[in-house]
Image (spheres, helix red, strand yellow):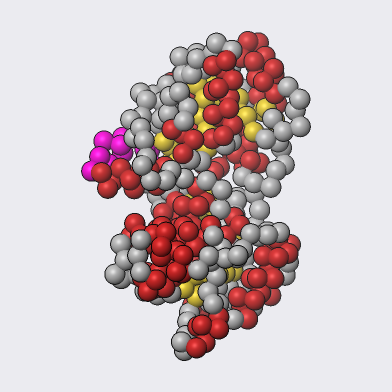
């Protein structure tokens, strides 16, 4: 059973009226911290507005956007919260699709369109349904390897990693560790970026330096073989969880990171804090991503533009120099009393509140350019 506003109010420690104000886009008297908690609980406990109550209150035409909540693991939880807060600040209500398969989500999205949604944010592959005929504007947040409106620039991100490892630490022999060649994610883009960056740096990149872990019965044996035979000195992982597991496996085999081998991740999730030395990873500016999503949606809604944009908008990514690449280890908070940040974007926010942001900022090497278009 979905949670009620009364139950959310009890969990957050505010009045029911305050919860209703936040969820209906009128959060003026509620602190940003409590707004985040309200949105977090509403999303995870499947809150949905009571349409009968809205009609009785005369708000059946309350302007709202739908958000497909199914496209959000670690950093994407933060994206959902940032996007929801931005919409609420503009006076929009947000309705989240409940967990389920893609067909169920599509039915809910069409329901929202019939109920008067001004647009829908989703990550569903637009080729799976007639997206160009969807009755309201869609904003597809996806990855560079398929059609979408907005994506992180992973291609350039992995090039930043390769250049940093080569130019700052002298690594010439590197390997890429991913799940497999063709997953429904950004990994093909990561692989292409790796091969391009190695070529740009004048470094050798053979097929054996591209290690798949999924469907591979002994990926660690192959990795150790590369370490010995090819003298690989740095491993770039397509996800933070892979990097964390790889560092743990190396440690069990007596290989130290970063003294003996450099390891980097992608995503800058909370896993960056759980490795023996903080994990160097691609840093995803989630707040910028949410702002770009809102800007693109507002343009679509103003023009009532249907279908996917001809040119993809890319949000630049940066590097978080945690220490696993060989840089001095980052100084991170040791303990959280309430919750665990889902991404380093959240961690940056917490550190900003504590007044230690300037000290922390030295570990971030963001791209300075604004979001760019890519066909």
Taking the image as drawn, is residue 16 in sight? yes
Residue at (36%, 42%) from the top-left corner? 337
Residue in the image at 50% along x and 21% along y: 262
Magenta-drawn segment = 355-366
Q: Is residue 157 visible?
A: no
Q: In what quadrant of the picture does the C terminus appear?
A: bottom right
Residue 374: % across, % down: 55, 54
Instruction: Answer whether residue 372 is magenta in the image.
Output: no
- Looking at the rendered structure, the number of numbered marks drawn on it comes to 0
Depth check, front residue: 233 or 42: 42
Q: Quadrant of the N terminus?
A: bottom right
Q: For the view shown, which residue lies furthest in the left direction?
A: 355
The image position of residue 56, as x and y in percent, is 50, 88
Horizontal side of 11 relative to 333 (left or right) equals right
In this view, 281 is above or below 276: below
The x, y position of residue 133, in whole percent, is 69, 75
Up-down relation of residue 152 to residue 96 (above or below)? above
145 relative position to 326: left or right: right
Quarter where residue 181 is shown: top right
Q: Is residue 305 rendered to the left or right of residue 101?
A: left
Residue 361 in the magenta stretch? The answer is yes
* Residue found 61% across the figure and 57% down from its top: 70
């Amino acid at each position: 059973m979905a949670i009620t506003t009364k139950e959310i109010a009890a969990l957050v420690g505010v009045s029911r009226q305050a919860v209703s104000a936040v969820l209906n886009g009128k959060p003026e008297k509620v602190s940003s911290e409590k707004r985040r908690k309200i949105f977090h609980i509403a999303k995870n406990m499947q809150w949905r507005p009571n349409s009968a109550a809205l009609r009785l209150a005369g708000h059946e035409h309350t302007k709202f956007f739908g958000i497909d909540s199914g496209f959000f693991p670690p950093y994407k939880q933060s994206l959902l919260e940032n996007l929801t807060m931005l919409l609420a600040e503009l006076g929009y209500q947000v309705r989240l699709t409940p967990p389920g398969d893609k067909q169920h989500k599509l039915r809910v999205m069409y329901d929202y369109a019939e109920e008067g949604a001004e647009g829908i944010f989703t990550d569903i592959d637009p080729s799976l349904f007639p997206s160009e005929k969807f009755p309201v504007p869609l904003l597809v947040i996806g990855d560079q390897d398929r059609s979408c409106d907005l994506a992180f620039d992973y291609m350039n991100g992995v090039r930043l990693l390769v250049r940093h490892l080569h130019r700052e630490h002298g690594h010439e022999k590197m390997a890429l560790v991913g799940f497999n060649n063709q997953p429904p994610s950004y990994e093909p883009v990561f692989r292409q970026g790796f091969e391009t960056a190695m070529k740009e740096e004048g470094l050798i990149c053979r097929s054996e330096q591209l290690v798949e872990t999924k469907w591979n019965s002994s990926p660690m044996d192959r990795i150790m073989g590369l370490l010995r035979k090819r003298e690989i000195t740095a491993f770039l992982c397509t996800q933070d969880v892979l990097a964390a597991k790889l560092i743990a496996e190396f440690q069990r085999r007596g290989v130290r990171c970063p003294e003996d081998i450099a390891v980097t991740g992608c995503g800058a999730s909370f896993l960056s804090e759980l490795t023996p030395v903080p994990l160097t990873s691609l840093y995803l500016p989630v707040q910028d991503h949410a702002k770009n999503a809102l800007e693109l949606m507002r343009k679509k809604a103003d023009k009532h533009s249907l279908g996917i944009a001809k040119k993809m908008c890319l949000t630049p990514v940066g590097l978080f120099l945690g220490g696993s690449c060989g840089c001095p280890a980052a100084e991170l908070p040791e303990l959280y009393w309430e919750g665990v940040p889902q991404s380093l974007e959240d961690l940056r926010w917490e550190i900003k509140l504590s007044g230690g942001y300037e000290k922390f900022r030295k570990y971030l090497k963001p791209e300075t350019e604004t979001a760019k278009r890519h066909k």
